[in-house]
Amino acid sequence: MTSETENAVGHADVRLEGSTDALPLSPSLGVTLDATRMPRRSTLVDRRVLRITAVAILLGIAAAFIARLLTALIGLVTNLAFYGRVSTAFSSPADNHLGLWVIAVPVIGGLIVGVMARWGSRAIRGHGIPEAMEQVLLNESKIPPRITFLKPISSAIAIGTGGPFGAEGPIIATGGALGSFVGQLLHVTGAERKVLLAAGAAAGMAAVFGSPVAAVVLAIELLLFELRPRSLIPVALATVAATGVRYATVGSAPVFAMPALATPGLLALLSYVGIGAVLGLISVGVTRIVYGIEDVFEKLPIHWMWWPAIGGVAVGVVGYFAPLTLGVGYSNIEDIVSGQLTLSALAFLCVMKFLSWSIALGSGTSGGTLAPLFTIGGALGALLGLGIAALAPQFGIDPRIAALVGMAAIFAGSARALLTAVVFAFETTGQPAGLLPLLGGCTAAYLISALLMRNTIMTEKIARRGVRVPAEYAADYLDQVVVRDACTHEVVTLRTTQTLAEVRRWFNEGLPDMQHQGYPVIDEAGHVRGVLTRRTLLDPQWHYTLSLGELVLREPIVVKESHSLREAADHMVAHNVGRLIVVGDEAPYLLVGILTRGDILTAHGQRLQEARQSGRYLHFRKGRVVKRPIKPAGV
């Protein structure tokens, strides 16, 4: 039984493979033509991508309903814990009348989460995104199926009992776990399972905030670590499906409604960029403090199962004095960006929310980071905006835009997700006048964070475990260089009619041409028949009367001159060889050159040279540009 892309003899169908190979001119040339068959497509996607996309759309719909279910579960726990009633309505714990008993509620929630983590899965601890990143990078995106159930339940308990977290992190983690689980059931490849994981995670975020574009960008920046059509299409359509379900069940209004904003002037725009830079500096401090608190918990002489309960004590105490810090606090974010809080209320909420959230997160309980960061950053941005408006009213600062910039900038700095922060703030408020301030402020925060902090709030945890997280996504250099520009064209060849005795006598002459490790063998017509290594030619088990044509036992592993070095390198790995015969595009039986692993490494020379040149600093002194070379290491 052959696949749809193979014909009766097991060769790829030219029509389906998109190959430009000509048909064999004679039976003897078929071997060479077959050897040039490489994984090159005439299109960027194939039918398999359509199947993965269909699965991703179903995942998006499922993730949207899971988001609704988790929201209802949080509401149920909140109503039971703080009001003693059975209701799934999403309500704030801030209106409770428990008095001092409010301190006990987060402690009980922390105890339950600790028990679930110890005897269920330790992976439910934290805010979920770093754990998903770790599975993508190290475990072929295989998340244990039990996380699909334990993560939302533990998060609902932690948040419902007053934990100062957002629901978006657990939903992102749950959607990713569901995508991974489906991928494991379908037995797809690791790359396809990563796409399904990212599709589920992005769909979860889109279902919570109604921000499909931001969810796609988040998946690219934090989960996929790539930007390819075969991964972008399924994730994008999954978020569309999830957002469609949200529109049908909740509505299409922005999550954080704001009054209409006026387009800022130049001085105001510069001020927003400055606010973003300040928030970038604060985001570095926030990240370091959070992980510093986590280090303190690591040193406690008690089992980690009890840490969430200790964190719950801090949540309860802070919640007693500042009830608005309890729970997800989405209404707080809306009040901040709408300009409904006074200066003192902003400062108090910012400080108390940070204390509660940082201690709780450091204790290892289950909950998200986005909503707390938005609350803290929005309050700080509003405070800075109010201060500038009071000191320099001529700047035309709008504290509401300043709050919006602060909300996005602290996320851009702490998570190093620039585009996600900008698009998210726009989609959740629907304010086009805020786009330019957001871009300037978030870029400034991103710059400061990149200068001062190597890892982020999302990657520090897994980086400490030895996981290397990609920080930059650049085009593959090998994919930009064609084989004809890197291969060796002056090739020393042998002929099929030569005997081993002749070749060995030739080796004994010790000429420079005899130092190669492999030699292409051609026939009388100049057609490539194979490659013989120096070891084979000198192997005493072969009698000296044998011809080289008799020694060629395997088909030649060849590459066309128009292929890229990336395709050639993959071809080498697939066939476990260190050199490839290069043949022409129009005449795939004629030798053009030979490509070795050394040639591929040498091709990086130009890129490395450019990198060295970038190490020269340009100093502007008295109108002159002075090039100063880098000092050698150790000087």
Image (cartoon, grey):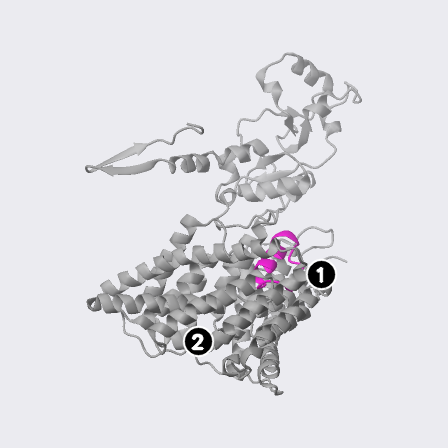
Amino acid type, residue under disc 2 in the picture: Asn
Label 1 CA crowd tier, 10 Å (few <14, some 14–19, many 20+): few
Of residues 274 and 422, the one drawn nearer to the viewer in this rendering: 274
**Residue 58 visible in the picture:** no
Of residues 481 and 344, the one drawn nearer to the viewer in this rendering: 344
Q: What residue range appears in magenta?
A: 124-142
Mark 2 highlights which residue? 332
Q: State the image coordinates of residue 216 (x, y, percent, origin top left).
A: 50, 65
Is 129 included in the stretch rendered in magenta?
A: yes
Mark 1 highlights which residue? 187
Residue at horizontal 64%, vertical 52%?
Answer: 138
517 shown above or below 568? above
Q: State the image coordinates of residue 468 (x, y, percent, origin top left).
A: 57, 48
Amino acid type, residue under disc 1 in the picture: His
Q: Residue furthest front?
A: 100
Is 223 included in the stretch rendered in magenta?
A: no
